Image (spheres, rainbow, N blue to C red):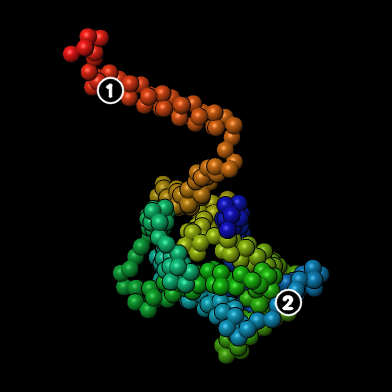
Amino acid sequence: MSKNQKLLGSFSILAATGIYGFFSILARIIGYELPIFFQNWTREIVASVILFLIIIATKTPWKKMKLKEFLWVWLRSMMGSIAFLMFFLSVNQMPIGTTYFLFYGGSTIIGYLLGHFLFYERMTTQKWFSIFFAMIGLGTIYSLHFTNVPLYLIAMALGAGGATAFWNVAMKKLNHFSSLQLTFLDNFLPIFFYVALSLITHETWSVPTLSPVWIASLGYGALFVITGQLVIFGFQRVDAQIGSIFMLAEVPIAILLGYLFYQETITTATLIGGLCIGIAILVPELSLILKKKKINPDKMTLERYFVDSYFLAKKKIKESDDTITKSCVTTPVHDGVSR
């Protein structure tokens, strides 16, 4: 993968996190006005219909999948759905700051582990540096209160992060399929899962209207189309470990949007934590941008040729002078008289 492609992948993931930051605003507008499973399957239908129309309009080829490939797609979509449910349950039963720390920390660490075991990515100094600053940043931003918190809730928040990490990196196993096909299946397959849960829990269904709640919910689904494309494009071009760090950009973006839209307070600790996360994200980017290119001898410039020739000639002259000097010292001098 070329350096430019990796940079494009990085910017694609960062763009996705920028949109994810707005999800919290839409979630607040929706609140509990719509039943949780009902609002999810209606959003997934909206995203699936939009993607289906795009596939038809662009005549995107639909590749046949082997059973193993389809299982990867199905597992990825289920992990995304399970991650949402575990996060929803944990954030409503334990301190929000603790939940977010466990969720983002879990997604980053599991993302690193998946990158190592699934894609044989190596841990470099830059990656260790990034995850170190990322954990400091998360710990500084989010308050941690584990007192009287049941272990199963801690495991649930970590599990939500781990499932999200799998959702992020799994498409690296499916690089030969179009992003439109993968995004469509990712939104279409969970519909049956959410409908079943909605029926089991006896949720009340309603007809969509032009109310702010429905507009926000369906707009949420439309954004799934964009973020799904950006995440797939990005993770297909960067290491799973690096991409997992980039996903943390959602944290400072969401905090900034909370300040702009809801006048939420930004503390000194929040600024320091955001700075640490920014450093964690920038380290691999700077290392990629500033990486020195190796010189190709076949493309050596004329200037470099003459400079190297000059120093080579100078070196030979010096070696010649040293040889002459050594000869004068060690060779007997004859005075012209025969002995």
The structure residue drawn at horizontal position 43% and vertical position 71%, both measured from the top left corner, is 117
291, above or below 131, in the image: above
Q: Which residue is mark 1?
A: 326
Report the front residue among 198 and 253: 253
Could you say whether the residue bearing mark 1 is in a helix, strand or loop? Answer: helix
In the rendered image, the residue lying farthest to the right is: 57
Report x, y in % for residue 224.
Answer: 65, 68
Q: Dot 1: within a 10 Å radius of its alpha carbon, few (fewer than 14), some, or many (20 or more) residues?
A: few
Nearest-to-viewer mark from 1 and 2: 1
Residue, far bottom = 200
| Residue nearest the viewer, comparing 193 with 58 | 58
Q: x and y percent of residue 165 in the render?
A: 49, 69
Horizontal side of 59 relative to 65 (left or right) equals right
Q: Earlier in the sequence, mark 1 or mark 2?
A: 2
**Quick one: SS at disc 2?**
loop
Left or right of residue 175: residue 102: left
- Name the amino acid, label 2: Trp
66, above or below 155, in the image: below
Q: Is residue 34 visible?
A: no
Q: Which residue is mark 2?
A: 62
Residue 304 or 315: which is nearer the viewer?
A: 315
Q: Residue at x 41, y 27 (%)?
A: 315
Mark 2: give few (<14), some (14-19) or many (20+) Cα within 10 Å: few
**Dividing the image into 4 quarters, which one contains the C terminus?**
top left
